[in-house]
Amino acid sequence: MEKVERLISIIMILLKKDVVPANEFAQLFNVSKRTILRDMETLGLSNIPIYSIYGVNGGYGIMDEYKIDKRLLSSSDLENILTALNGLEQILISEEVDVTIKKIEGMVSPLSLKSSIQLSFYDWEGRSEILQTLKTVQESILMRRLVSFDYIDKNGTTSNRIVEPYQLHFSEMSWYLKGFCLQRKGNRTFKLSRIDNLIVDEKTFNPREFLLEQEREANYQPQLVAINALISPSIKDHFIERYGRKSIEHYSSEYLLATIHVPQNSLGFQFLASFGTNLKIIKPKTYVEDFRNYLNKMVEKYS
């Protein structure tokens, strides 16, 4: 950990706790007690009101007048933040998130670190491969630098793009870059796993007015179609999680009736096909026909 990060962490810990022994800081940051002493001297010279207490129960503290109102963030608040960050760490695989987690852990009582909520994400091997692209794009956003890359669309067509990067977006299992494409003269969203040969340009750009607001308002969802499907009770939980209990009603001793909205394209077909023989679409007829054609093409691959 860099010295500046360590100093910030020390301040955050002292804002939460009354007195912290020097050896506790030394163990936490894996440095010597002498290094901690120098850190305290640096903070004192920076007008941070650090004081020391000698003796068995001694250590370092920070003047109460300098501390934030503890009512602003309770232990429960901090535990909730840690829970969210621990989940985010699994998606990002980021050293920066890890450092942030350690800082907040230092503000929470050790007795409170066992959260009642645990988040888990499947550790896809490809996630680590995309980390460098993620970091590079994030840096380009912060530095307001243009990025260029080869983009492979869903049909396998490659095009070269020059983009003003504005925002990284994580949806379901994938990362996306939102930005202004200079070739297409408009806002575009790019899936990071389809980006090759990413280069950060030395040129910077001035952010376009209202672009991010327009991005938030833009509707990237394809047109959805209401369908009725018979589903087996074994997959009921999947539909409750995605569409809510109101989407399901009793149909027979063998099936439930699900009324849901899905795209009438390959995305919708892939989702429905994932349930195999546990699902049967009954209407509308146009959707049934398109879905049947999709399944027939799958079968032809193996005939």
Image: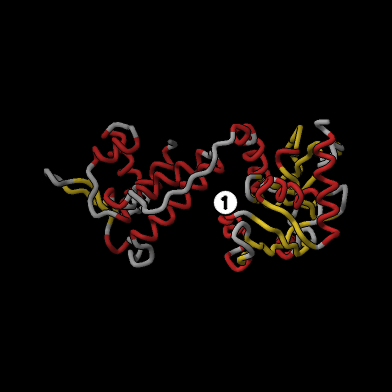
Q: Position of residue 256 (x, y in %)?
A: 63, 61
Q: Position of residue 249 (x, y in %)?
A: 61, 67
Circle 1 sits in a helix, a strand or a loop, which is it? helix
Count neighbours of disc 1 (C-alpha within 10 A) and say few if under 14, some if 14 to 19, many if 20 or more: few
Quarter of the figure with residue 93: top right
The way the protein has been coloured in the rendering is secondary structure
Tell whether 19 sits left or right of 163. Answer: left
Q: Residue at x 58, y 56 (%)?
A: 236
Q: Identify the residue at image location x=35%, y=36%.
A: 29
> In the rendered image, which residue does mark 1 sit on?
234
Q: In percent of the image, x 65 and y 56: which residue is there?
A: 231
Occupied quadrant, residue 76: bottom left
- Mark 1 belongs to which amino acid? Ser
Measured from the top left, where is residue 108 in percent x and y? Answer: 32, 52
The residue closer to the viewer here, 235 or 166, is 235
- Tag count: 1
- Above or below, comparing residue 216 to residue 98 in the picture: below
Q: Nearer the viewer, residue 51 or 110?
A: 110
In terms of depth relative to the viewer, which is nearer, 142 or 241? 241
The residue positioned farthest toward the front in the image shown: 253
Q: Is there any visible trace of residue 264 in the rendered image?
A: yes
On-image quarter of the N terminus: top left
Q: Nearer the viewer, residue 83 or 180?
A: 83
Q: Is residue 209 visible?
A: no
Q: Quadrant of the C terminus?
A: top right
At x 75%, y 52%, the residue is: 268
